[in-house]
Image (spheres, helix red, strand yellow):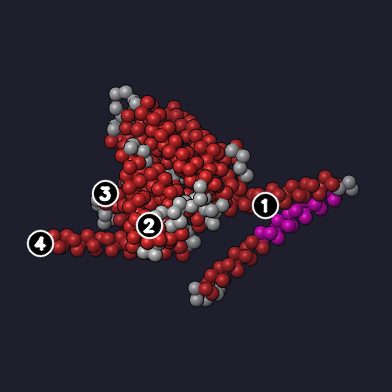
Amino acid sequence: MEAEAVGHAAGLVEVAFVTVVAVTAGLLLMRLRLPPMIGFILAGMALGPTGLGVIRNSENVSALAEMGVVVLLFFIGMEISLKAFIQTLKPALQIAGGQLCAAMAIAFALMAVSSATLAEAIILGFIIALSSTVVAMKMLAEIGELRTDVGRITVGVLIAQDIAVVPMLILATALGDPGEIGWGLISLKIVGAVAVLALLLRYLGRRGKLRPAFAAAVEDNVEILVLGSLAFCLAAAAISGVAGLSPAYGAFIAGLIVGSSTLRGRVIPVIEPIQSLLLVVFFLSIGLLIDLSFIVEEWRLVLIASVFVIVAKTVFNVLLIRMAGLPHRTAMEAGLSMAQIGEFSFIIAAAAFASDAIGDDVYRLAIAVTAVTLLVSPAWMSVMRMIDNEARFGIAEFRRALAEISSERGPAARGVHAVEDWAHRLNIRRRALRRAIRRRRHAGRVEEGRPAV
């Protein structure tokens, strides 16, 4: 009994230590004006099996992280506007299909210049095609775009990707098995998933708010709201998983139903803190999966592959969204938010590795590149948004100057003056931006009670 008590105490000490390190890392990143989720990933790396070894068994953490993804999809389903989602569903499916084709092209190009097998190329294509729902939603929320057209098209594409996870997982397992691949079963599950979603959207879109018979009895009972909502979410996720579909798909369906009911306004505030806590665990679990020894040994390969993937995904995402008829700004914001590799890629890589569809080196490389892209994605988005804004401003000013030149019929000197005036206005705008940044920092220091230097 005494040894068991000591073991429990040691477990509590580990949990407390991990929590303190994660919060400290998150606060430090916030002070550096970077997303705190980067700090949570770094904390997981530092405390994981290949780091300090504080957490040696990450199975429990991974289980909580998967629950975090499920609750996130449930939350997104509740918050989403049905009309807006239906409007973006068709372009979202087109964009997600284009992303898969582009990822497969990248994977087969890599196979042509390496010793990868056909099965490994297909698995890598699946891994590259998926983006992170968690990271994309958090980044869009931080820049205030989650409930705009940018957020709606991004959510639509990510839901389409989540549906595609179902056949990807089946193929990832089947490619390591010399037996026949059940194409009929795969097709049936895809059609079933799409049909259920389409029928539900049609039903919910044609009627008003759902009014559960027990709504009046539970709407003021926080405990029942929390437990009942989580039970409904997890039950739908479990049913979806048993049916061979993604658990996140079932959670999203449950979220759509709750979001279309009169309890929506009551459920969202009580579920949000739980969702935030589970997402912290999710980011910690990403850090735990990273094999630091492999990254140190193969840092050049990991760096080149990570940069190539994040740049290629950004370019293809923006092009595909523009081809779907959406404006440049929407394409840029949405494309950057989906530039990383997603959390379901970990699951596909693990399933493929367990079935011997991919080798150990390919598996470790896939995990490392996925984790690195998740880690650098927020910084990549910030830098590229800043560059895009500067470039668009410069192009607009240059076009205005050219218009002035073409409208002038006087001597060439007037054209020179127009260009000089364009450069002068550009310089003034940049100085104004710098002054605005200084004023914002000054206001932040005053609010925090720090000296306004």
Q: Which residue is mark 4?
A: 1
Residue 414 visible somewhere in the drawing: yes
- Position of 29 with respect to 173 (left or right) is right
Which of pointers 2 and 1 indicates the residue nearer the eye? 2
Q: Earlier in the sequence, mark 4 or mark 1?
A: 4
Q: Earlier in the sequence, mark 3 or mark 1?
A: 3
Disc 3 to disc 2, C-alpha distance:
38 Å
Which amino acid does the dot numbered 2 rest on? Phe
Disc 3 to disc 1, C-alpha distance:
49 Å
Question: Tag count in the figure?
Answer: 4
Write the start and end of the magenta stretch as one range. Answer: 414-431
Which amino acid does the dot numbered 3 rest on? Glu
Which amino acid does the dot numbered 4 rest on? Met
Q: Earlier in the sequence, mark 2 or mark 4?
A: 4
Residue 306 visible somewhere in the drawing: no
Query: Which mark is on residue 393?
Result: 1
Which amino acid does the dot numbered 1 rest on? Phe
Going 34% across and 60% down the picture, which residue do you hit?
Answer: 224
Disc 1 crowd, CA 10 A, few/some/many (<14, 14-19, 20+): few
